[in-house]
Amino acid sequence: MATITDQKIKETMQRYSIIGSAPELINAVKRALIIAPIDISVLINGENGTGKEFFPKIIHDNSPRKHKKYIAVNCGAIPAGTISSELFGHEKGAFTNAESEHSGYFEVADGGTIFLDEVADLTLDAQARLLRVLESGEYLRVGSSKVRKTDVRVVAATNRDLMRMVKTGEFREDLFYRIAAIRIEVPPLRDRGEDIKMLATKFSYDYAEQHNRPPLMFDESAYRALMSFRWSGNVRELQSLIREMSSFENGIVNGDTVKRYLNQKNHNANLPVVFDKAQHDYTQERELIFQLILQMQQEIKELKDMARNGSFGGKAQGSKIHLSSNINELQRQVSTISDVVKTDDTNDTDMVWHKATGDYDYEEPEVTHIPQSRHAINDIKATAIDVEEEKIKTLEDTEREVIINAIERNKGRRKQTAAELGISERTLYRKIKEYGLEYRNNRK
């Protein structure tokens, strides 16, 4: 393995204007430099806006092919019907409007490097042609039977899960292992910590220099707001925000100003605004659900015992039993039984002990906070049995139902709903989007 010094990595990042010091980013640059001299295909993985396009250039410029052509192709921007023609060329008359022969990118880049951005968007026909080039260096122009040869190194990039696409038949498995011989992961901006400060400052000074105006400055609260935002659009989204703020703000901005702009941008794009850095940590929600499930299991057991024994309560008079007969009502107490009675299985009246006579007698007992008839008590027994026999739900189903009921009880008010569930309003909003419950949440 080639030895890549820290100085070499630093010089490379400066050359390609890659800003940051996050370990994941440094490692990605280092991997690109290590693999550059080795003539092998590389796959760059990363979300949109992370700067994947820099890495093919690093690989090409540090390889033996650096004096040959470098061509970048956005596969997603080429119509499916012409992608094979663009990549491999076509003969005159091969299809309508093919008035002359055309040299494809693989022919033009012979000896150099081709960067296939958004490679997941290739059609299955183009994937088959690409596989042949990678395996043998041979290809056919569209409309030709003449085999041509080319010597091209392929560096591909995608923001999609190619392994999942392989399983669904959208991407060829043999091609996947050809182009993914070496993989480089470009980290998302939200995982780069202090890099967000450096990038925000750089973009502010770049804008100021370009438009001949003082640079926008940020206080600590502004930096905290920037660092806690999710940045689904990554570096591009951050750059766009700084440009907009620099156009309308002056001097030093604070966290409230940053959040106002982020809210406005995401509101216009119908996107959720998330200022939760630990957004993927579901620990608190899981603990809440587990507690509710355990409570439900205990209450079901109590209900089952009551139904089996034909009685509600124990020996002690006046004890209170809190029932929750439906998983959707776990956080509320829907029934309170204050007085406990014994029932006779063969009569519609209740048998109670009379001290005066020293015997049992039939009479209607005084009941509070529970249904006033034996039929209602039987309904509770049936409910206990129904709950016991109900099919076990997944954790996600349980969580979704709990949230739905809380939203309905609070008439769509997020603040009250979040308080009842014991989670933050931001987390609740994310859950509403995740489970598609926006139609139930029509109030703030």
Image: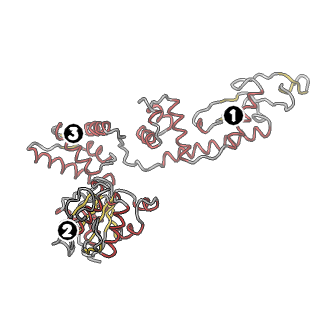
Query: Is 172 placed left or right of 342 in the picture?
Result: left
Residue that badge 1 annotates: 321
Q: Residue at x 49, y 45 (%)?
A: 285
Residue that badge 3 annotates: 253
> Which colour style is shown?
secondary structure
Q: CA distance from mark 2 to mark 1?
A: 81 Å
Q: At which x and y percent is residue 402?
A: 54, 38
**In the figure, residue 313 lies in which quadrant?**
top right
Of all residues shown, which one is farthest toward the left? 212
Q: At which x and y percent is residue 258?
A: 26, 40
Q: How many marks?
A: 3
Q: Residue at x 40, y 47 (%)?
A: 279
Q: Say which amino acid is labelled 2.
A: Val
In the image, 51 versus 274, the foreground residue is 51
Residues at circles 2 and 1 in contact by the CB criterion of under 8 Å: no
* Mark 3 vs 2, N-terminal side: 2
Mark 1 residue crowding within 10 angstroms, few (<14) / some (14–19) / many (20+): some
SS state under label 1: strand
- The numbered disc on residue 77 is none
Residue that badge 2 annotates: 108
Q: Nearer the viewer, mark 3 or mark 2?
A: 2
Residue 59: in sight, yes or no? Answer: no
